Amino acid sequence: MSVNKWLSKWLLVVLILSVSFPAFARNTQYMLRYRDAVGTSEAKEKLGSDIQFFFGEQKYPAVEREIGTWVANKKTNAANKSDERACQWAFLSAMLSLKQRAIREGGDAVVKIHSYYKKNTNTSATEFECGAGTFVAGVALRGTVVKLK
């Protein structure tokens, strides 16, 4: 086989593969309950009780000082996991990131936590948004670190 024929066939294969792979990609959006994700024994152990969390428009105690607002954008490997489990794992990672930020900044609570997936604000006191793909699931949360009175 000549080099030109071989190169032509190789380019055709590359072209076919590059067009067909996006067809396998997916980004399924879910709204899942916070309490299911933070209610597991693993989540309770990792999140502890030293930082308080308040979702959406939940009422919270009086604030002594507002420290700042941050985004925690976390992804996880979704292979061999259900979408729900992968989303819960990504959510827990985002919550741990907010907790670490609160500790680092001298806060004792994170308030007004809401989904910020793909920079779209979705405020809920009961649910968070997650995007699950073929190989990766992701959750983005935005919250305000405060020092309570």
Image (cartoon, rainbow, N blue to C red):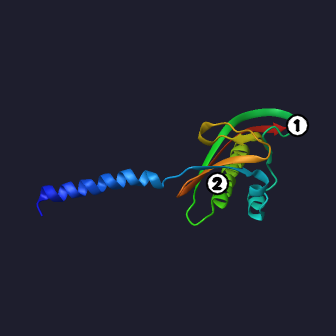
- Judging from the image, what secondary structure is the residue with disc 2 in? helix
User: Residue 125, how many percent across, how many down?
Assistant: 80, 43
User: Residue 9, how many percent across, how many down?
Assistant: 22, 58
**Callout 1: 10 Å neighbours few (<14), some, many (20+)?**
few
Query: Which one is in front, 14 or 49?
Result: 14
Query: How many numbered marks does the figure carry?
Result: 2
Q: Is residue 116 left or right of residue 67?
A: left
Q: Residue at (79%, 54%) from the top-left corner?
A: 35
Query: Which one is in front, 37 or 70?
Result: 37
| Residue 44 visible to an observer of this rendering | yes
Q: Residue at (78%, 64%) from the top-left corner?
A: 41
Task: Report which residue position mark 1 lands on.
Answer: 149
Q: Is residue 33 above or below residue 115?
A: below
Quarter of the image with the N terminus in it: bottom left
Task: Give me the C-alpha separation between circle 1 and circle 2.
Answer: 31 Å
Q: Residue at (57%, 60%) from the top-left corner?
A: 78
N-term-proximal mark, 1 vs 2: 2
User: Residue 42, how many percent across, how many down?
Assistant: 74, 63
Image quadrant where residue 105 sits: top right
- Judging from the image, what secondary structure is the residue with disc 1 in? loop
Task: Report which residue position mark 2 lands on.
Answer: 90
| Residue 47 visible to an observer of this rendering | no
Q: Amino acid at mark 1?
A: Lys
Quarter of the image with the C terminus in it: top right
**Given the current orientation, which residue lies at the most extreme bottom position?**
80
**Callout 2: 10 Å neighbours few (<14), some, many (20+)?**
many
Q: Which mark is residue 23?
A: none
Q: Amino acid at mark 2?
A: Ala
Q: Residue at (66%, 61%) from the top-left corner?
A: 85
